[in-house]
Amino acid sequence: MAANNTLLQLRHRIDAIDSEVLTLLNARAQCAEEVAIAKKAELDKELADLANKEGKTEKQEVCFYRPEREAQILHRMVEENKGPLRDEQVTKIYRDIISSCLALEECLKIAYLGPAGTFTQKATHKHFGDWVETLPQESISNVFQEVEVGRAHYGVVPIENSTGGIVSHTLDRFIKSPLYICGEIQLPIHQNLLSLSRDWQSVTQVYSHQQSLTQCQNWLKSNLPNALLTAVASNAEAAKMASNDANCAAISSIEAAEIYQVPVIQQRIEDLANNTTRFIVIAKHDNLPSGYDKTSLLISAKNQSGALFALLKPLAKYGLDMSRIESRPSQSTNWEYVFFLDIDGHAQDSNVQAALAELEQQADLLRILGSYPVAIQ
């Protein structure tokens, strides 16, 4: 009886805490609504002042979502977390809280590389929460286009994988796109073999995205050495194809298996246990500093000896760490390349500004693709 009384008391305590949490959540939501009203009033005043000064009365859309502000909140919550909740649980809870409150102000439209069930969709919900409208696209170029023409507020596309390397289509699209990178997402990737066949080792063809095939190449050689490996637009598309043919299989996600009703035959077949894909968030705007930022650059080197060394020298001079460098054909002249660099810090930081000023003197082209908060797990 004593044990039952203790359990009952704990349940009453949980009920009381739940009521208190609900009250606080609604108080936070009300505060968020007041922030939206204040932002709109501030913009209306700026437009009125501009109209009085220059006669311009163009309507501007209020941007309620601020990536740098969200990053500051999440970092603070992790720093204040004393457990027993894990840091990644805390960040997920707060992303959903932020998403729910933001939905009271506006419903964000997010374009992503589809169809439904892709890892890109999963990354989209990890970053923006569930209270957004997601718009699946057939290609990375289509994601860029949806944001460029304004049908989506943001886009999410893959940029690199820890096993398969860079996603060249994403980098190439930036060469001519005016969009900025305003966020990044790191998502652990677990690949699974899906098939309608009861004898999965007898399948004659395996469908998946080229990146997924690369991430599982050793497993495939050992377990399905005679199967034809066919790259398709996405791993969700592969699951859809496998749902119509018992002689084939797909490498895809658990989510895609559920959507297209294809049994999971083998789980976690990726070659490396820490297989991770990095996604980026694209938008028409750049971000203010969050205090936890990195900056992506597009640079074209002058066609002369030691040009690349000259580009990297200012970074070392001002103590900037470079976390990534990739080269891609310039798409304008044969045998000329552009370089994509990730460096620590925000473009408004004094040392970054100084380095960029010197870089501009050395480069044929220097474009800041965006300064944005570093991914939080």
Image: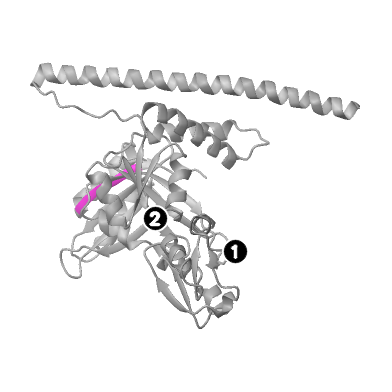
Q: In this view, does 23 lie above or below 174?
A: above
Residue 60 in view: yes
Q: Where is residue 377 in the image (x, y as percent from the top left)?
A: 52, 45
Q: What element carries label 1?
A: loop
Frontmost residue, 119 versus 178: 119
Residue topped by disc 1: 267
Viewer-nearest of discs 1 and 2: 2
Mark 1 residue type:
Gln
Q: Is residue 24 depicted above or below 310 in this figure?
A: above
* Residue extending furthest toward the bottom: 226
Q: Is 89 or 360 nearer to us in this picture?
A: 89
Position of the N terminus by quadrant: top right
State how far apart marks 1 and 2 are (Cα): 21 Å
The segment highlighted magenta reads 365-371
Q: Residue at x 42, y 65 (%)?
A: 211
Name the residue at the right extreme.
1
Please indicate, yes or no, whether residue 156 appears anywhere in the rendered image. Answer: no
- Residue 48 on image: x %, y %: 17, 17
Quarter residue 107 falls in: top left
**Which image quadrant is residue 353 in?**
top left
Magenta segment, prevailing SS (helix, strand or loop): strand
Display coloring: one colour
Horizontal side, residue 306 vs residue 117: left or right: left
Task: Please report the residue visible at 28 percent of the width from the left and 54 percent of the height from the top.
Answer: 142
Reply above or below: 269 against 85: below
Q: Which amino acid does label 2 sit on?
A: Pro
* Residue 12: in magenta span: no
Helix, strand or loop status at disc 2: loop
Residue 376: image location, x then y, percent = 49, 43
The reply to whether dot 1 and dot 2 touch (C-beta < 8 Å) is no
Query: Can you identify the residue that label 2 sits on?
Result: 115
Who comes first in sequence, dot 1 or dot 2?
2
